[in-house]
Image (cartoon, rainbow, N blue to C red):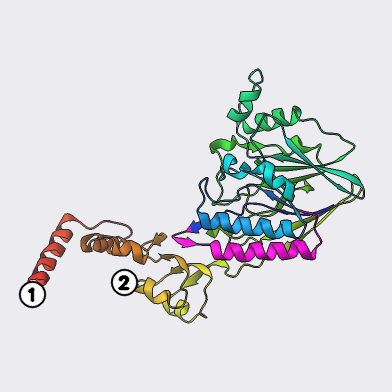
Amino acid sequence: MKFLHIADLHLGKRLNGVSFLEDQIFLLNQISALAEAEHADAVVIAGDVYQKASPQSEAMAAFDAFVTRLAAAGIRVLVISGNHDSAQRISYFSALVRNAGVYVSEEFTGTVQTVALSDAFGEVRFGLLPFLKPIQARRFYPDEKIETYEDAVRAVLRHSPIDPAARNVLVCHQFVTGAETCDSEETAVGGLDCVDASAFDDYDYVALGHIHGPQRLKRDTLRYAGSLMKYSFSEVNHRKSVTVVEMLEKGDVRLHTVPLTAPHDMRTVEGMLSDVMAMPYSEDYVWVTIHDELPPPDARVTISTVFPNMLKFSVVNSKTKMDIDVLAREQMESKSIPELFSDFYRLQNNDVAPSERHIEMLTAILKELEGEVR
C-alpha cells in the first residue's frame, strides 16, 4: 500500500491582502502528478483543507478539482478536518463521495472512524480522527476526567480498539509534544493542547497535520507532512515536501519525501536601499528591511518595482532602533495627511509621536497651501 501524506493546505489563505490561491492550485497539480507518477493507492490529507471555516467558492473549487483528478485516476483520498475547517462542511456529502473512493471524516461520534483498504498483504486500516477538543470528548465520556487535549485523544483512542496484528494508520490533526512550531499555527496558551507521542504507540504510521514544518517525532513513522507552502515569514527556511509512505508486511514501513516547488518563494531581503534596488527583479513574496538613516518617503513604492510581491517593508536604523513596519500603499491612501505625517515622524524618531504643537503647525501650513491653491 503506497500513499502520499500531505496536510495543512489552507486553501484560500491570504497574507497582507495577497491571495495565495494561484500558487496553491499550482502545488495541488504538482501533488496530483506525483501521486500518478508514484502509482499511489491513496492520498491522505491530515486536516486544515481550508484557511477558514467558511471558505470562499474559489478555494472550494480548487479542492474539488484536486480530489476529482485523483479519483478519476483511481487514487483514493482520505481527508480529515483540522482546527481551521468546519467539520460539518468537510463531511458534507461524505456518504455519497465514498462511492468515488473519497473518504471524509464524518461527524464525530466519540470513536475513531475506520476505513479499510486492501492490497497484496491484506488490509490497511486507516483511522480518521478530526481535530479534537476536550469538550467534544467529554460529551461522550462524561464519567472520565478529560481536561486536556491529551486526555481527550487518549480517551477516544482507548474507546477505539484496533487489531494489533493488522497494519494500522492514524490520520490526526493535533499538536504533539516536542514539535517545532512557527508563527502561522494556532496553539493553546501554556501547552494545554499538547499530546504526548506515546498516545499513538499502537499505530504503524501516524499521519499528522497542524504543524507547518515537515518533521518526525520520536520515530520516522510519526510525522508531520508540513503545510502546502510557506504561510509566514517564520517559515522561510522550511523545505516543503510530500511524504510518500509504502506499507509492506506488518512492521515494514518505508518512506521518502519529495520536495514541493512553489512558483514563488517566501524570503527576507535586507540592506541599504541602493543595495536592494540593485538586486535582480523577483516576484517572490518578500519582507524587505532597509537600514538607511533617512529613507525617502516613497521607498516602499520604489522597491516594489524590483519586488512587486513585497508583503512587508521595514526600516531599521539608529533612529528607529527597532523594526518599524512601513504602511502598505492601500493603508496610506485611507489615512489623512496629519495621520501620515504622524506615522512618518514616528518612523524618524524612534516611534515617538509628534507633539500637539507639531500637528498645529502642520494644520496651519495645510490651510495656507489650500488657500494658495484656491
- Please tell me whether the stretch drawn in magenta is mainly helix, strand or loop: helix
Question: Which residues fall within the magenta stretch?
Answer: 15-42
Q: Which amino acid does label 1 sit on?
A: Glu
Residue at 61% x, 60% y is 229
Where disc 1 sits, the SS reads helix
Q: Is residue 318 left or right of residue 81?
A: left
SS label for mark 2: loop
Q: Percent x, y for residue 314?
A: 42, 65
Residue furthest top in the image: 143
Read off the residue under disc 1: 372
3D distance between C-alphas at marks 2 and 1: 24 Å
Q: Would you say 3 lies left or right of 213 here?
A: right
**Could you tell me which quadrant the C terminus lies in?**
bottom left
Residue 322 falls in image quadrant? bottom left
Residue 319 at x, y percent in the picture:
35, 64
Residue 23 colored magenta? yes
- The circle drawn on residue 297 is 2
Q: Which of 280 and 373 is in front in this view?
A: 373
- Inspect this view and state whether residue 255 appears: yes
Going by the numbered disc 2, the residue's amino acid type is Pro
Whether residue 146 is visible, yes or no, is no
Q: Residue at x 85, y 52 (%)?
A: 1
Q: Say which of 217 and 136 sits in front.
A: 136
Q: In which quarter of the image is residue 94?
A: top right
Kindly check if marks 2 and 1 are in contact, taking CB atoms under 8 A apart as contact.
Answer: no
Q: Is residue 59 above or below residue 134?
A: below
Q: Label 2 crowding class (10 Å Cα cut-off): few <14, some 14-19, many 20+?
A: few
